[in-house]
Amino acid sequence: MNPNTATARQATRSATYPARDHKLEEHFDEHVLAARLGVSVQSVRRWRWEGNGPRWRKFQGAVRYSQSDLEEWISTRPTGGGN
């Protein structure tokens, strides 16, 4: 293999997929999300269907939520009090 070709391929790959400085974030399912929020799994499913819940992803057909997406979604929810 030509070393120049390998270097060019590596440079292209680096430009296409930039290096990340963080670990892959852990994801959890709708049952864990429901338990963390103190709501039913059906509520979580309804939010997802309506597009009102936290951002979600599918991995091999399984819906998963990340902690950072959950925290972001919670921060956008209305708060009470404030008097």
Image: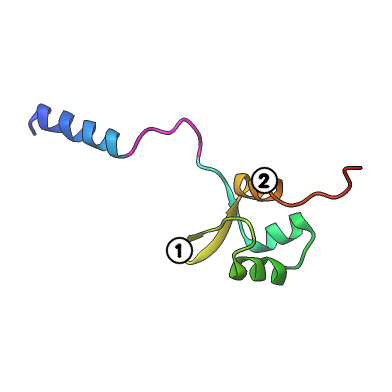
Where in the figure is residue 20, as x and y percent of width and height? 43, 33
Q: Work out whether 56 lies above or below 16.
A: below
User: Within the magenta stretch, is there residue 18?
Assistant: yes
Tell me the residue at 55%/43% (across/down): 25
Q: Are marks 1 and 2 in contact (CB under 8 Å)?
A: no
**Residue with the mark numbered 2:** 71
User: Within the magenta stretch, is there residue 83?
Assistant: no
Q: Which residues are magenta?
A: 17-23
> Can you name the residue that lies furthest to the left here?
2
Q: Between 59 and 48, which is closer to the camera in this rendering? A: 48
Tell me the residue at 16%/31% (across/down): 8
Residue 64 picture quarter: bottom right
Amino acid, disc 2:
Glu
In this image, 39 relative to 73: left or right? right
Q: Give the position of the N terminus as an image quadrant.
A: top left
Q: Secondary structure at mark 2?
A: helix
* Tag shown at residue 60: 1
In this image, 9 relative to 35: left or right? left
Where in the figure is residue 16, as x and y percent of width and height? 29, 39
Amino acid, disc 1:
Gln
**Mark positioned earlier in the residue sequence (1 or 2):** 1
Q: Give the position of the C terminus as an image quadrant.
A: top right
> Marks 1 and 2, Cα distance to the nearest angstrom?
24 Å
